Image (spheres, grey):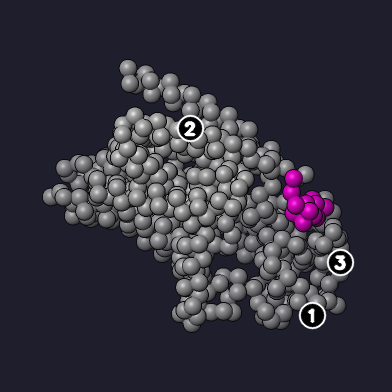
Amino acid sequence: MKDKIFKWRWIILSLIFWFIAISNIPKEFLDLGGDSAQYVILAESLLEGSGYRAINYPEQPFFYSYPPFFSFLLLPIIYFFGRNFYLMHILIVFLGYLSLLFFYHLFKKYSDSKAAAIATVFLAINKIFIFHSTQHILSDIPYLFCSSLTLLAASKYLERDNSLNKEGIFTILGLLLCYFTRYVGVTLFLGVLVALLLTPHNARFKKISFISIGFLLPFLFWQAAAKILNPSSATSYANLFLLADPYKPFLGTIFTNPRYLFLRLTRGVSSYYSVIGLSFFFYFIKRWQIFAGVTSLISLILLFLGVRFKFRQNKTCVFHYYFLLYVFFIIFWHFYNLGEAMRYVIPILPFMIFYFFTALKKILSYLPQKISFFAFCSLLSALFIFNILALPIEKNTYQNLSPHLKSFISLHRWMKENLPKGGTIISRKPTVTYLYTNHKAICFPYASNPEQIWSEVLENNIKYIIVDEISPETYDYLLPFLYEYKDKFKLLKAIEKTGLFEVIKAMPKKP
C-alpha cells in the first residue's frame, strides 16, 4: 500500500517538476558566462579525435581546468544532433530529476518517509535548483546527480561488515565521477572518509584503505597526466585559490597580502548568509527587500539547529561531514557576485532544505500536538506557495537581454557572416567568441602595463580585438592598452559601445 501511495505521489511530483522545467528551458543559446561554451567545445574536440583539448585556443592545450565527465555526457547529443542546446538542457533537467529520487531515498534512510518527501518536494520547486537545472549548460546539476548517487551507495557501504563488496565499488566509482565532474568532489571523498572513520566497526580501517586507494590512484594518475600534457594548468586551481584577487594578479597572493584572506572570509560569510535566506524565501525577499535580513537570520538559525539536531541523532550520517567541509571550502573560494554564490550552493542545497525542515518540525514539536500539527502544516503551505510564486523565470531570449549583451551577441553574429576564415581574436569571452564565430580566441592578460598586452598580441599573432561593455576588466586593462597603441588598430565594426578592431601593424615575434 505504501509503495502504491509513493508511486502516485512521485508521478504527481514528476509531472509538476517537468512542467516547470520545460516551461523555463530557453529556446536559444544565450549563456555568455563562457563555461557552458567551453564544455561544448571540449566535447567537440573529443568527437574530432583531438583528445581533451581546448580547440578554441591557438595552441589547443590539454584542458585540465575543466573535469572531463560532463563533456563526455554531451558527446551523444553533439554526435547525433550537433549543437542542439535544447537537448543539452533536457539532459541536465533529467539528471536533476533523477537526483530528486536519490535524495528522497537518502533522506528516508536517515529520517522517515514524510521528512524525506517534504525535503524532496521543496527541492523540486526551489527557485535556485530550477534555475540551474534549466538555464545553463553547466556541470552543477550533473555533479548533484553524481553526489546523490554516491552518498546513497556510501550510506549502504557504512553498514556492511566487510570492506570488499559491491557497495564499496559503487562508492569508489561514484566518488570518481563526482571528482571528474567537478574537482570540488574532493570534499565528498574527505567527507565519506570521516564518516567511515567515526563509524564503530572492526573493518573501518580496511574500508578507509579500500576507498582511499580506489579514489587516489586515478586521482594521482590524472594529476600526473595534467603535469605532463599541460604543466601550467595542473596547478591552476591551487594558484587561483592563493591569489588575493584573480582579476587583479598584481596584488599578489594571500601570503603577501594576508588581509585579503580575511576579506574573502567576511565576503563569503556575508554572501552565503544572503543565499541561505534566498534558498527558502526567494519570492518573499525579492518582493519585500526590507525583510531580507530577518528571513536570512531565521533561515540560518533553523539551518544551524537542524545540523545540530541531526548530528546529535546520528554522528555517522554519511552526508554531515561532506556538508560541513563543502561549506568551509566555498566560504573561502573566490566568487564575484551573488549569482555565482547561488551556483556554488547547489551541491548542498538538498541538505540545507533537509536540515531546515528538521529544525522547524523539532521546534514545533514542543507545542501541544494539535497546535504543532496545525502550525507545521500552515508553515509548509505558506512556504510551498512562496516557492511556487518565485518559479516563473524571465525568458532568456535575445529581446530580454540588457543592451550591452545584445550588442555583444550582434557583433559576433556580424563577425560570423563577414570575417574571413582564420585570424585569432582577443576577447573577454574567448569561448563564446569561438562558439559563435569558429575563430580561435584568447583573453587579454590582466596586466596594468599595456606593453604586456601588446607582447601577447605579438606572440599569438592576434588579428582582431573585441572591446565590450560586459566586464570591468575591459575598462581596467584593455581600454588603456588600446589608447596606448591606438595607431596600430583599425575599427571594423561598432554596435553601440561594443566594437571590433583589426590589428594592422602586428607581426609575430622572431625566434
The amino acid marked with disc number 2 is Ser
Question: Which residue matches tag 1?
Answer: 484
Q: Nearest to the eye among marks 2 and 1: give it.
A: 2
| Residue 410 covered by magenta stretch | yes
The answer to whether residue 409 is visible is no
Q: Looking at the image, which residue is at 16% across and 50% down?
A: 200
Q: CA distance from mark 3 to mark 1?
A: 15 Å
Above or below 442: residue 158: above
Q: Quadrant of residue 74?
A: top right
Q: Nearer the viewer, residue 277 or 18?
A: 277
| Secondary element type, mark 2 | helix
Task: Decide: few, some or many residues near mark 2? Use Cα within 10 Å; few <14, some 14-19, many ≥20.
Answer: few
Q: Looking at the image, which residue is at 72% across and 79% down?
A: 450
Which image quarter is the C terminus in? bottom right
Label the magenta part by its dominant secondary structure: helix
Q: Looking at the image, which residue is at 30% across and 40% down?
A: 366
Tag 2 and tag 3, C-beta contact below 8 Å:
no
Question: Which residue matches tag 2?
Answer: 381
Q: Nearer the viewer, residue 348 or 211?
A: 348
Residue ranking furthest to the left: 202
Which image quarter is the N terminus in? top left
Above or below 455: residue 395: above
The amino acid marked with disc number 1 is Glu
Residue 31 picture location, percent across and down: 66, 49
Task: Give the side of residue 289 with respect to residue 4, left or right.
Answer: right
Tell me which numbered mark, 3 or 1, is placed earlier along the sequence: 1
The amino acid marked with disc number 3 is Leu
Question: Which residue matches tag 3?
Answer: 491
| Secondary element type, mark 1 | helix
Tell me the magenta residue range: 400-415
Q: CA distance from mark 2 to mark 1?
A: 62 Å
Q: Looking at the image, which residue is at 85% across and 59% down?
A: 496
